[in-house]
Amino acid sequence: MLIKISELRDMEVINVQDGRRLGLIMDIEMDLTEGYIVGLILPDEPITGITSLFRSSREIFIPFEQILKIGIDVILVDTSLSKSSEKTVY
């Protein structure tokens, strides 16, 4: 099955450990030298309005190893397989 990166951004990411919706993909980290996807980047919480001027946004990084299945409209991940990390973006 082939899929475009633009199609991935419209898919909901769901953690199979607790059934929690993690959100939509904000970005994809790729290793262009080796030609593979390193992981998915999701927003931790949306920051809007005046508070967005004074706070940094946080991201959730899902390593490729945690992706179990890419379906038609959802991506299933297992965050217990290895540690996901939060990154702060300024």
Image (cartoon, grey):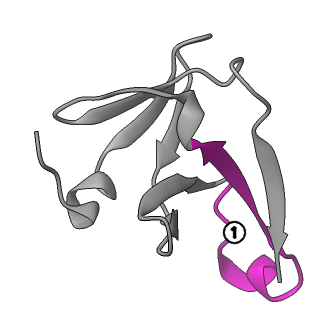
- Kind of element beneath mark 1: loop
Observer-nearest residue: 37 or 72?
37
Query: In the rendered view, would you say 33 is above or below 6?
Result: below
Residue range of the region highlighted in magenta in the rendering: 44-63
Pointer 1 residue: 47
Most extreme residue toward the front is 34
State the residue at coordinates (64%, 61%).
46
Does the magenta portion include 55? yes
Question: Residue 89 location in percent, x, y?
Answer: 79, 76
Q: In this view, does 75 lie to the left or right of 66?
A: left
State the residue at coordinates (61%, 11%).
18
Does the magenta portion include 54? yes
Residue 44 visible, this angle: no
Three-letter amino acid code of the residue under disc 1: Ile
State the residue at coordinates (50%, 74%).
33
Observer-nearest residue: 88 or 55?
88
Question: Residue 36 location in percent, x, y?
Answer: 44, 57
